[in-house]
Image (cartoon, grey):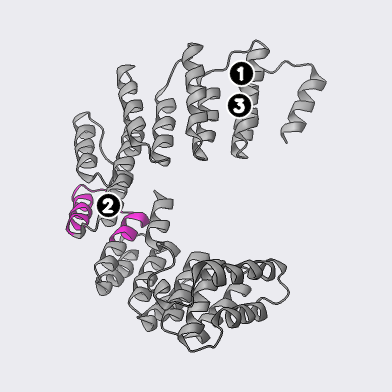
Amino acid sequence: MLVEAEYVLNRSGRVPDVFVYNSFIITLCRKGNAVEANARLNEMIELGIEPDSCNYTTVMYCYCKFGQVDQSMKIFAQMLKRGVGLTIITYTVLIEGFVKVGDQQRAEYAFSALKRDGIKPDLFVYNALINGYCKEGYMQTAYELKNMMEKDGVSPDISTYNIIMHGLVKKGSKENVRKTFDEIVRRGISPDKITFTNLIDSFCKEGNLNEAYFTLCSMSSTGVKPDVVACSVLLDGYCEVGQMEEASGLFRKMLDIGLKPDLILYRTLVWGFCKIGDVGKACRLLTMMKKDDILPDYVIYRSLVRGFNKSGAVNAVETAAVKMEDIFRGNEIVLSNLYYWVHEALLVDGVFDDKNCDSSPTDFRNEFLAAAL
């Protein structure tokens, strides 16, 4: 598409301007090609076309999206050198980039620079910085920043509260999770899927699975439909304590209401059944995965080894590989991966030792929620 557009421009004799280049840069960034997008910036300068703030910020965002904050900073420095006006969007991209790579100190510097430039922080800036503090576990500082934003006349939204709730769940602060949820309701803010998922996660972590299930069931009454992520968090809670009947019942209800399992959900259930040595049900899940065109990964293979080991198989690593090969017969990707998985299981993980598999193979809850925030 981009090549075709350039061809049309060349044929027409039209000289690209800032807006045309911005379209090119946006297209490249959507494809994740930050290097080529940056090259277009330099091309503009060589042609005497001065890039504007939108051009620069778009490329910065692309670099930050992939964690290349230092490259983003080089573009930021170029903006300063060429006297390009910095906008609140530019600073927001920087702050989010620093938070993404865990550099909260530089996120704070960017926040301070924004205010020194006379730019009033908005909701997106505050949420980005609060997210950084919550990721690092600095909940008191996150609360202080929330109070500061309210004093500045910026009202927290559901995203603000979801970020704080997720931070509290990670810290195991169950009472404050509940208080935060109550504050959301009290202020007339509508909870969304992430809000309820945080609450379910908190109940699961404290072992209150009945309350977690009640919360999941009550979502619909507030106009929020349960999704795969919310159900997966509760499934992980059931699997953690070996309540596989309850996990199976919830799984059936998910299928009944049309929710489609994903890889992480299958990981959870396979691990849960293998944890109690029920490899039969674990293998039936693998068959379902094949029908759903979802390929297993090393985490699932490792769980299967654990299941066969627990059920008394003489060579669990080989038995798991043979079973998986049989289920996914004809799938060259799985068969190719199995060679490496067996090698890893034998030489690296030492999965014959049951104590290596006592806990969930992945921190599912944080994987779900962090991706959503």
**Where does the image place residue 162, in percent across and percent down from the top left?**
31, 50
322 left or right of 175? right
> Which residue appears at 47% of the width and 88% of the height?
311
Q: Nearer the viewer, mark 1 or mark 2?
A: 2
Q: Which mark is residue 165?
A: 2
Res. 158 visible in picture: no
> Which residue appears at 33% of the width and 46% of the height?
135
Inter-mark Cα distance, 2 to 3: 37 Å
Magenta part, dominant SS: helix
Q: Which mark is residue 367?
A: none
Q: Is 289 drawn above or below residue 193 in the view shown? A: below
Could you classify mark 2 by the number of other residues whose Cα lies within 10 Å: few (under 14), some (14-19), or many (20 or more)?
Answer: many
| Residue nearer the viewer, 280 or 70 | 70
| Residue nearer the viewer, 355 or 213 | 355
Which residue has dot 1 on it? 18
Badge 2 amino acid: Met
Mark 1 / mark 3, whichever is N-terminal: 1
Q: Secondary structure at mark 1?
A: helix
Mark 1 / mark 2, whichever is N-terminal: 1
Badge 1 amino acid: Val
> Bounds of the magenta span?
175-199
Which residue has dot 3 on it? 38
The quarter of the picture where the N terminus appears is top right
**Where does the image place residue 178, in percent across and percent down from the top left?**
20, 58
Query: Residue 188 magenta-drawn?
Result: yes
Q: How many badges with numbers are in the image?
A: 3
Could you classify mark 3 by the number of other residues whose Cα lies within 10 Å: few (under 14), some (14-19), or many (20 or more)?
Answer: many
191 left or right of 280? left
Q: Nearer the viewer, mark 1 or mark 3?
A: 3
Badge 3 amino acid: Asn
